[in-house]
Amino acid sequence: MLNLDDLWVNDDRFDTPTEKLTDPIPVLFQSGYLTIKEYERRGKLYHLCFPNQEVRQGFSKSLVRYYTAQDMNRYDAIVYAYSKNVLINDDMGAFMPHLKAFYDKFPYTIINNNERHYQAVIFTIFTMLGEDVKVEHTTSDGRIDLVLKTDKSIFIFELKYKKSADIAMAQIIDKDYAKAFADDGRKVVKVGINFSENQRSIEDWVIE
């Protein structure tokens, strides 16, 4: 999900007969989720992306529903909690327990216990909600794990695995990620999150 909006693939990936496909990219292309943005003839590379925001959001909803297939109330709950706490009240701190509860109920069989997995899930949730969200946002002094922009605020997320939320927050501050948004009139909120190996979920968070 993290790279599907800016994906370069070799044309060989489209040569496999449909009945033998195990690669999801040709399937997503054939189903209309991905479209060709450009073609690089020398390298025989296709540049794929979502055709529009509606398709991107719809695909994200499908993934979230996959994670919540056994309990659709979880899907409704996370949407309501985000709308109430973040969009209306501009309070990420009030939303975080709901996000933790969402992670807590993941079946262990679909969890890849690493930082990349947890980053992909939170990115998918925000995309499903139709928000302006980017991962690996580059700055002059590094890359921000995730940036979420609402009408009122810009949220800078640093995610850690098997470390601590304080370490995540220290990185945001030490690298002064907020300066990348100094010319934006919205409030900048820093969010450090740590994921636990044993709990397979959010362990703690810090917000400033």
Image (cartoon, rainbow, N blue to C red):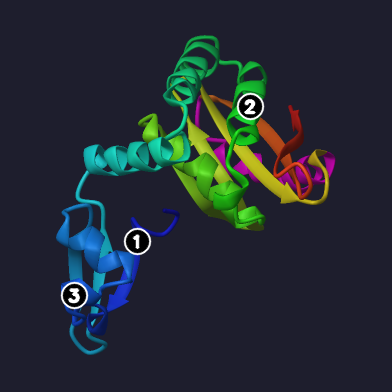
Inter-mark Cα distance, 1 to 2: 31 Å
Q: Position of residue 100 (x, y in %)?
A: 65, 30
Q: Position of residue 57 (x, y in %)?
A: 31, 38
* Residue 175 seen by the camera: no
Inter-mark Cα distance, 3 to 1: 13 Å
Q: Looking at numbered disc 2 in the image, what kind of residue is underneath it?
A: Ala
**Sooner in the amino-acid sequence: mark 3 or mark 1:** 1
For mark 1, what is the residue?
6
For mark 3, what is the residue?
39
Which residue range is magenta in the image?
A: 166-185
* Foreground residue among 163 and 133: 163
Residue drawn at the location 42% of the way across and 35% of the way down? 69
Q: Looking at numbered disc 3 in the image, what kind of residue is underneath it?
A: Tyr
Q: Are marks 3 and 2 in contact (CB under 8 Å)?
A: no
Inter-mark Cα distance, 3 to 2: 43 Å
Residue 27: assigned label: none
Single out the residue that lies furthest toward the bottom: 42
Q: Main secondary structure of the magenta part?
A: helix
Question: The residue tagged with tag 3: helix, strand or loop?
Answer: strand
For mark 2, what is the residue?
101
Left or right: where 67 falls relative to 96: left
* Foreground residue among 187 and 13: 13
**Sooner in the amino-acid sequence: mark 3 or mark 2:** 3
Residue drawn at the location 53% of the way across and 40% of the way down? 122
Q: Residues within 10 Å of mark 1 (few under 14, many from 20)?
A: few
* Foreground residue among 198 and 149: 198
Q: Position of residue 179 (x, y in %)?
A: 63, 41
Q: Looking at numbered disc 1 in the image, what kind of residue is underneath it?
A: Asp
Q: Is residue 200 above or below residue 25?
A: above
